[in-house]
Image (spheres, grey):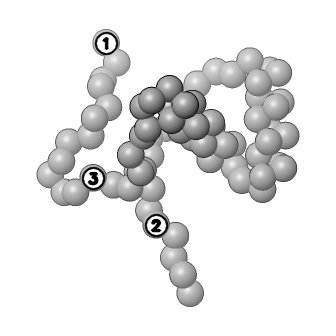
Amino acid sequence: MPTAKRRWTRCAGVTLEVPVLNYLQVVSEKENRDRSYCINLLVREHAERNGCPLPPATPPPAGVPAMIKPET
């Protein structure tokens, strides 16, 4: 039985406008994916179009610090 690769994630509680949330729900149902997957895909596509491709979301090797800056 194949196992899914573990993805490196963090919860980022964001507030979405109601029309954006409604569209996101439509997209997630159409693609048969969860909303987080769709948001990640949209951000990755945007970054790629703007010349900033993002690395895969696999966990970093042990001992490598995360590149997430703490809120100030």
Q: Give the CA separation, mark 2 to mark 1.
A: 32 Å
The quadrant the N terminus occupies is bottom right
- Spatial separation of the CA atoms under disc 2 and disc 3: 13 Å
Q: Which residue is mark 2?
A: 5
Residue at screen point 69% across, 49% down: 34
Q: Looking at the picture, which amino acid does disc 3 mark?
A: Pro
Residue 42 showing in the rendered view = yes
Point 62% across, 36% down: residue:
42
> Is 20 in front, or is 45?
45
| First-in-chain label (2 vs 1) | 2
Camera-side residue of 29 and 48: 48
Q: Which residue is mark 3?
A: 60
Quarter assignment of residue 2: bottom right
Residue position marked by numbered label 1 in the rendering: 72
Q: Identify the mark nearer the N-term, 2 or 3.
A: 2
Residue drawn 28% across the image and 35% down it: 67
Question: Which amino acid type corresponds to the residue marked 1 in the rendered image?
Answer: Thr
- What's the residue type where badge 2 is placed? Lys
Could you say which quadrant of the image residue 53 lies in?
top left
Q: Residue furthest bottom?
A: 1
Q: Is residue 15 left or right of residue 3?
A: right
